[in-house]
Image (tube, rainbow, N blue to C red):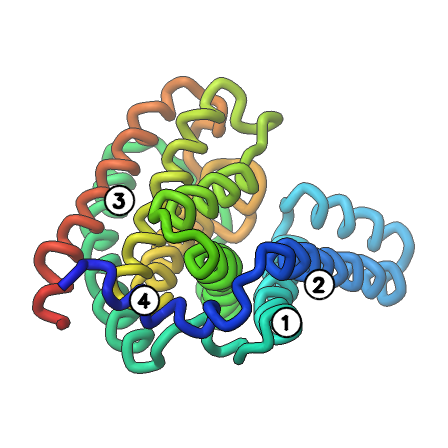
Amino acid sequence: MSAYAPHDRYIAPARRHPELWRLLAGCVLLFAVYLGTILGAAFAIERLLPRATAGIFLDGLQTARGVGPTLVLLGTFVGMAGGAMAAAWIMHRRSPWSLFGDAASLAHHGGRMLILAVAVAAITVPLALITLNTDPNLPIGQWALLLPLTLPLIALQTGAEELAFRGYLQQQLAARFAQTAVWLILPGAIFAAAHMDPATQGANMWPILAVTFGFALVAADLTARTGSLGAAWALHFVNNVQAILLIAIPGPLSALSLRHLQMTSSDPALMPFIILDLAVLGAIWLIYVRRVLPRAA
């Protein structure tokens, strides 16, 4: 049996209306709903807060800095999730829930990957705290009080990205094009490009994009091997919890973290850790594919 046999079942609903024009229109709809959610949040802030406060808040929302603006920014990913589901329903006349894949696989592989990724993080995060120079950010009491809000928001943010890239885009490309490289590589390239930030990443931009692209390939491969978003979503969630809530690089999306690295995204000293991050990602993928997946079948 092919390693990607579950993928055939996963993309079956997308085969009903695989026309390329529907996919392009669906992408426009997805982006419009997401952008509309961001603009709606900005409009609400302008109306609800005093003018001076609203201006500061909107500046923080635009740059993804500050506790309040970062929380709102994570919340706007409901628009990305809703946009992907609307595109599936309106443009392809299929259930929005089909983007998630089989419910049993979603829960089964999501749970197993969550255990594996947390186990790896339990090793790598303490090692990072020991070997890296970090500064405190949020007081631990405030950080802990925010967890009931920040954890669901990161689950929303990562779930929305999985729905858009490994759900909608991967499914519809696979339904239209038989070549594995198309549905495996193209969504990953778009995913990486969406994380491009030359102003803050500087000379490290291409290595950071390479790691982001590598993550996208791993997530797409796991989705194809399991037939659902469960494993990819769980891996994405744990990765972002580490990068946003535990040890963050100062800059965008770092306001909610417990500690900050003593280096920026453009610092040449970050390069060894970018390589290490890619190695850890590869190790998790290998363990899941070679050890966990055969037992989960």
Q: Which mark is residue 281?
A: 3
Mark 2 residue type: Val
Q: Which mark is residue 33?
A: 2
Distance from the alpha carbon under mark 3 to that under mark 2: 31 Å
Q: Which mark is residue 86?
A: 1
In primary-sequence order, the first of circles 4 and 3 is 4
Mark 3 residue type: Leu
Q: Secondary structure at mark 2?
A: helix
Return the residue nearer the eye: 270 or 109: 109
In primary-sequence order, the first of circles 2 and 1 is 2
Q: Name the side, left or right, on which 134 lies relative to 45.
A: left
Distance from the alpha carbon under mark 3 to that under mark 1: 32 Å
In primary-sequence order, the first of circles 4 and 2 is 4
Mark 4 residue type: Asp
Q: Which mark is residue 8?
A: 4
Question: Depth-wise, is mark 4 or mark 3 nearer the camera?
Answer: 4
